[in-house]
Amino acid sequence: MKGIFFSISDKKRAVLASALIFFFLMAASFTSYYLYAAESSSQDELCTEGELSTEEGELSMETENEEDTETEEYTDESDYEEIDDDELISAFYQTEELPGVEFRGTLVFVIDDAGNSFIDLEPFLNFPGAITIAVLPGLPNSIETARRIREAGKELFLHQPMESIGGRNPGPGAIYTGMEMEEIREIINRNLDELWPVAGMNNHEGSRISMDEEIMEIILEICRERDIVYLDSRTTAETRAPEVARRMGINIVQRDVFIDNEQNLQSISNQINIGIARAERQGFAIMIGHTWSALLAAHLIELYPELLEQGYTFSSASQLIYNTEP
C-alpha cells in the first residue's frame, strides 16, 4: 500500500489526501448530527412526560375538588306506589310551547337527592328546559349545590328527609313521628334557612310521616307561612297529605311516576312514556328521578326537542302547582 501511494505523482497524492480528509469530515459531521438528534428526542420525550404529569396533576386536583365529602348517599328507596287515575288533579298549564304546535300536555321533571355530588348534579343543570331539583339538607355540599341550581336558573326545592315505614335512615335534618311538634317545626325551618330561597318542598322517604295528619298539617302550615309549595312524592298510597291540604285550603300535587327505580335505559324510557301518556290524558304529569341516575340526564336532554315538537310543554313544579285548580 505504502509503495503504491508513493509511486503516484505528487498531484495525485494531494487529490487522494483531500478526498480522505473530506470523507473523515463528513463522517464526523453525520456522527455529531445523530448524537444531537438523539439527545433532542430524549429531551422532547422528557418534556412531554412532564407536561402530561402536570396536566394529570391538574385534573387530579380538579377531581379532588369535585369529589363528594359525604361518603354515604341518602336516596329514596321507600315502598313506591302508583297513583290511580281517578285520584289525579287536572291542570292545563302551558310553558315553553312551540308556536303552531297543538298542546298535548305539560311535563314536570323533579330531580331528587341533590347535595351528594356536584358531578352528578352538573348534567341536570345543563337541561335546556324547566326542571325542579330537590336538595337534601345538612350535607357538606348542600349549600353550594343550592347556589349552583339557582345560578343555572333551575328551580330549587328542599328535599325534606322524613321517617319511612321501613325504618331506613333518611339522613341529616330528618323529622320523625316521635318528635314534639315544635321540634319538627324548628328542624324544617332550619333546613329551609340553610338552602333559602327555595320555591317549594317535597318529602325524602317519609312514608310514615305522610300518614300522620297532625305532622302533615305542621308541614303545610310552614309552607303557607313561607309562601312555598308542597309536592307529595307519594312514597305510600296511604298518604294523608291531599286530605290535609284540602282541609286547610292549600293546593298541592302528587307525583305520578318514579322514572329511575331500575337503572337501565329501557326501564327509564318506559317510565317516561307512562308519564307522557298520563300527561296527555290529564293535562300534566309529575315525574321524579334522581341525580345519581347516570343515564337520566342525557336521556332527558335528548328527548327535550322531540317532546316540544310533539306538543308537550315543560314546567317547574311550583309553576304547575300555582296554576292548578285545587
Image: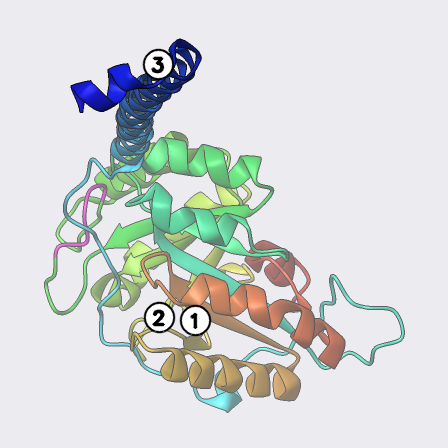
Q: Please state, as top left, top right, bottom left or bottom right, where the C terminus lies in the image.
A: bottom right
What residue is shown with label 1?
Answer: 243
The part of the chain drawn in magenta is: 169-173
Task: Kindly identify the amino acid type of the residue bearing the numbered disc 1.
Answer: Glu
Q: Given this view, does label 2 or label 3 mark the residue nearer the observer?
A: 3
At label 2, the amino acid type is Arg
Please give the name of the residue rendered at 12% of the width and 52% of the height, measured from the top-left corner: 178
Nearer-N-terminus badge (2/3)? 3
Tag 2, which secondary structure? Answer: loop
Q: Residue at x 64, y 61 (%)?
A: 315
Q: Are marks 2 and 1 in contact (CB under 8 Å)?
A: yes
Question: Is 179 or 233 nearer to us in this picture?
Answer: 233
Q: Give the residue drawn at x 43%, y 77%.
A: 257
In the depicted structure, whether residue 27 falls above or below residue 156: above
Asked if disc 3 and disc 1 are in contact, CB closer than 8 Å, the reply is: no
Horizontal and vertical percent position of residue 118: 36, 42
Distance from Cα at disc 2 to Cα at disc 1: 6 Å
- Give the SS element for disc 3: helix
Q: Report the side of 291 relative to 182 (left or right).
A: right
Disc 3: which residue = 17
Residue hosting label 2? 240
Q: CA distance from mark 3 to mark 1?
A: 114 Å
Quarter where residue 259 is shown: bottom left
Towards the viewer: 195 or 55: 55
Helix, strand or loop for the magenta stretch, by majority? loop
